[in-house]
Amino acid sequence: MTPSAVHEFALDNGFRSLLVRREGLPIVAAALFYTVGSRDERTGESGVSHFLEHMMFKGTTRYAKGEIDLITTRLGGSNNAYTDHDTTAYHFSLASDRWQVALDIEASRMRDCLFDDAEFAAEKSVVLEELAMGQDDPWRCLWETTEALAFRVHPYHRPIIGYRGDLERLTPDDMRAYYRRHYGPNRAYLVVVGDVDIADTERRIASTFAEFTPVPERDAPLPEPARAGELRGAIRAPGSIARIAMAAPVGRMGERDDFVLDIVSVVLGSGRSSRLHRRLVLDEELATSISTSNEPRLDPGLFWIMAELRPGADPERAELILREELDKLREDGVTAEERKRAIMQLRSGFLFEGETALGEAMRIGQFETGAVGGRRRLDDVLRLYDEIGRRELRGAIERWLAPDSWTVVWSLPEGQRALRPRPLPKPRPARAKAGRGHGTVRVAGRRGVSR
Amino acid sequence: MTPAGTSIRLDIAERELRNGLRIIAICNPGVPTFAATLSLRANRLDEGAGEHGLAYLVGACLEESTRHRTSVELAEAVEGLGASLDTHSSGGTVQCPAEEASRSLRLLREAVFEPAFVLREVRRVQQEIVAEIEDDDADPRALARRRFHREVYGRHPYARPSYATAEQILAYRPQDLKRFHQRLFAPREGVLAVAGPLPVDDGLELATRAFRSLRGEPPARREVPPPAHLDAPRDVHLPLRREQVHVYAGHVGVRRTDPDYIPLLVMDHVLGSGPGFTSRIARRLRDELGLCYTVYASITSSAGLEPGTFTAYIGTSKEHRAAAIEGFVAEMRRLRAEPPTEAELRDVHDYLTGSYVLGLERNASLVNYAIHVARFGLGLDYLECYPDLVRAVTRDDVRRVAEAHLAPEQMVVVSAGAG
């Protein structure tokens, strides 16, 4: 996609649109991104962003409860929504001769959500069931525990779905106030991709959204302070499988090191030829699966390593080997072959993300709302991968993946003995950066909660 | 999602190779990507006595070493093209950038037809499957689903999980895998579908070059007696200390070739698998009562060459278990007593005839479509007929198939988790 392929315009009230004309099937994807997510929640109101996203389907002054789904169904389309730490997004895929109904629906949802008491109570039960479902998911428990340890001050500390107590206490008035504070034209980005007439679409958007009044701009959350040394935790899960999550703080989405760490992530843990898969799954036969993820965030995010062990495998030995591989990577760097293979995989992943109109719309919206440089950074992605050399890879590994930078959490089977305390890590190499707290990003690794 | 729900004509062509492999190519113009799926006749119904789980194990070993490369060399070759390879007991799928189509097809062929079944690798994969079984043992949803199939399918082979038991899986030696593979992995009666930006003739040619030298014929398909319907309801609960309980309720379903399939597809969307929360069950149990996050019901989604199941599922709190099951039964009965309203039927017609094009954007979906129409003898022009088939379904048709195929009085209910 070239820079000129995106037509961008803004209304006086701050509403911004990004339009892309795409040939092929007569499909249009329209996605509205609000710059609000669990990052914007105050103490005691955890989970309100996600719960609010649910309520946006439960009635506005113009659309009764369920009507948005019904209209979409009648038009032969699909719609959904999700909330993550940084954003809330609502999206439609519809035929190109009728997609404009999405604009009317989003306009109504931006200002006129009802928060009927009975609907609020019924949907609260749904959200609490969703929370319960997550509590039964060992991976979700592990991620949330790891994030709670890795972020002590920044609101990324809290789970997107919220805490049960906060959700139970939340009232329709609380939610209404949150909605008024965060949902407005200046906090929204509309992305439209597909078989559209750009000039006509621009006119329609202007006539639909021009009259809306702006809401307060987004507050910056408290930054995560630098920390010295590793953090560790352990939780228990039913069954016989031990799982580990290791997370290291990294830079922001769209920074150059974000793309560097994408390559590192593939070399380390993406695919059967990756280092960790070969060592832990194939050679040592300790794990059944391994993955790494350079996770996108607006504020400093995390680089993840996750592994699921074979029943009965020794967690201490598995962690020792993970550490050995990280040491090797830091000392020897990435080989030319590994670099080349990783770039092929990343290029290919980028192509596959753009296979559908919705995939392209979501990627543009996520970069625009989350990345340094916004959606224009997308134009650099493939070039950046190509120009990042082995020396730069080594520098990023030293900066971000130092031995004591990790938060390590084990999920151990009930009944299995706890791990022995690890000896203190070796002192950090002199070249490692002292402060931490800049996140990194990858669209494919985005973690959110869907309706 | 064609304007006014008209039909879509794909650029699609087919040829049959001398070795009996049927090749279907679809042109998806302008996309920079390519996908291919190979679907062989082999499947778990070919397992003989004492071979339970062998098809699954063979499928899982196809990404390991081949006669020409080690497991790691195969992975490096695939990933070096920017491709992904997934294999299973009936073949596999490869996806890649379009310019790597030819090399990716050759790797798919090598993985599926030329595995080495090295002892150490087979042993490792066996352990990985045992881990999967143990993981499922602790997962209430997987546990409930496994038991549900056991109860519904009775003596039919689908009563067993495809991975069998840990004991059975661990008993196989590489020569067992080699024998099974040699017997069943043959091109005849197989289908290879490819989709990408290539003109269809080029796609056919590319696939022909990669697969024409294969030889072999699988044995005749084993006829399996269809599963019997239960004559009385059954209710099983497997208690586990969890937040939620996962409930599966249902009975034996239909084959994809059942003449009632399309009316049942419409029925499913009225009853339990409409988009959003538009179906009766989702509207009632989630939207109105707030009992759950996930709920659905369907008879067509599992219909295959063998009968599938009618399955209603809900994940809910233990205090809602009874209300959820009552809700399933009430809506099934209501559909038999009260056919869909004109408005409900029109909504489903509009959705089904309008939305299917959304599934045609990805090459992977296009090859799935091609395999589907080939396997079930629907004809390559099926998409063109599909809107008319759906629109022909009347309210009476839905009531008739609900009466004929839903049995709320003879359901198996299996739950696992809290309670």
Image (tube, grey):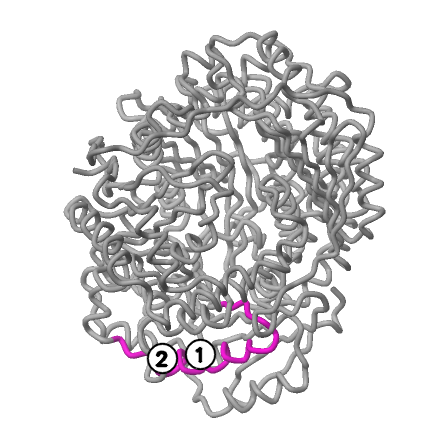
Label 2 is placed on what type of residue? Answer: Tyr
- The C terminus of chain B lies in which quarter of the figure? top left
Q: Quadrant of residue B117?
A: top right
Res A229 visible: yes
In the depicted structure, whether residue B152 falls above or below residue B219: below
At horizontal 66% and vertical 22% (from top left) the residue drawn is B185
Q: As shown in the figure, which amino acid type bears the numbered disc 1? A: Ile
Q: Is residue A412 visible?
A: no
Q: Secondary structure at mark 2?
A: loop
Picture coordinates of residue A443, whole percent (x, y): 57, 55
Which residue is tagged 1? A105
Q: Position of residue A89 (x, y in %)?
A: 47, 66
Callout 1 environment at 10 Å: few (<14), some (14 to 19), or many (20+)? some
Which is more toward the observer, B173 or B301? Answer: B301
> With A9 as the anchor, is A49 left or right in this view?
left
In the picture shown, does residue A80 fall above or below A232?
below
Q: Which residues are magenta?
A: A91-115
**Quarter assignment of residue A401:** top right
* Image mark 2: chain: A
Q: Are marks 1 and 2 in contact (CB under 8 Å)?
A: yes
Look at mark 2 in the image and give the residue it sits on: A63
Q: Chain of mark 1?
A: A
Of labels 1 and 2, earlier in sequence is 2
From the top left corner, tell me how far across and down residue B54 is, in percent.
52, 17
> Residue at horizontal 78%, vertical 49%?
A386
Number of numbered discs: 2
Q: Is residue A109 magenta?
A: yes
Q: CA distance from mark 1 to mark 2?
A: 8 Å
